[in-house]
Amino acid sequence: MKYVLILGHNLTDKNKLQTEIKYLFEKNERKVFETERACKALVNHISIVAHEKHPRCKPITLELWKPGSRNDLHLCRGLGLDVRFYELAERNESVSTKPDTCAEEEYFIRTEGYSGNSLIWWRPNSQGYTSDLKKAGKYSKEEAESICRGRGTELAYKSSKVLGLPNGLFTTVHADYLRKDDADIDFRPHLLAEKEVSDE
């Protein structure tokens, strides 16, 4: 099981040790780790290097934990920095990283809001929401346009765009990877108003 290191919010540093730890994590952001052991080894290495460089600072304990039933790894005592190792889906799982070029393009539908730093998607058959891409539904272009037009807040992205993100396929999609302006179907009211003005 592979993981990718993603950093979230960044608050004010309290001392030199905290600054050093955050710097070392930032140097490793977006790197892919082959195993959970490799993730823990990095955390341990960063802890040792930072404490050796600033021995007079009060020690900070760095530990990884799994929230709930997910396989993502979070750093305890986040130092004002949200440190997460996101699980990367295996390529032989139900969500393929290679879109079927013969089939009609399908769409993932994104709803407003976030789960941590992750985007939230519609489940299949309009049955709720999920941040887990493996549990998200795929919709035809007609279905996606109908949902997005009816809600005025939802966005649809081509499945090939989402599954072709850097570093392989995430089980969750970090907000940094897909902006609202990247949507392939967008019926948000302010954009429609801007279009009407430009057409006059």
Image: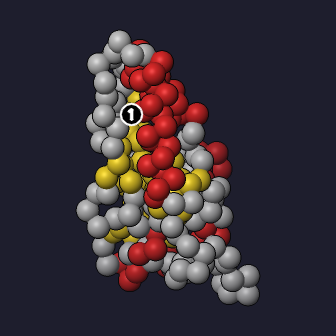
- Identified by mark 1, the residue type is Leu
Residue visible at 46% across and 69% down? 133
Looking at the image, the residue that sits furthest to the top is 56
Vertical arrangement, residue 140 with respect to residue 45, above or below: below
Residue 174's x, y, as percent?
49, 52
Secondary element at image label 1: strand
Residue 192's x, y, as percent?
53, 53
Residue 18's x, y, as percent?
39, 23
Q: Is residue 21 left or right of residue 69?
A: right
Circle count: 1
Query: Can the viewer see residue 83 in this picture?
Result: yes
Residue visible at 52% across and 30% down? 24
Nearer to me, 2 or 154: 2
* Quarter-of-image position of residue 168: bottom right
Q: Is residue 28 left or right of residue 48?
A: right
Looking at the image, the residue that sits furthest to the left is 68
Residue 179's x, y, as percent?
54, 49
Residue visible at 32% across and 57% down? 66
Vertical arrangement, residue 39 with respect to residue 122, above or below: above
Residue under numbered circle 1: 81
Residue visible at 34% across and 38% down? 62
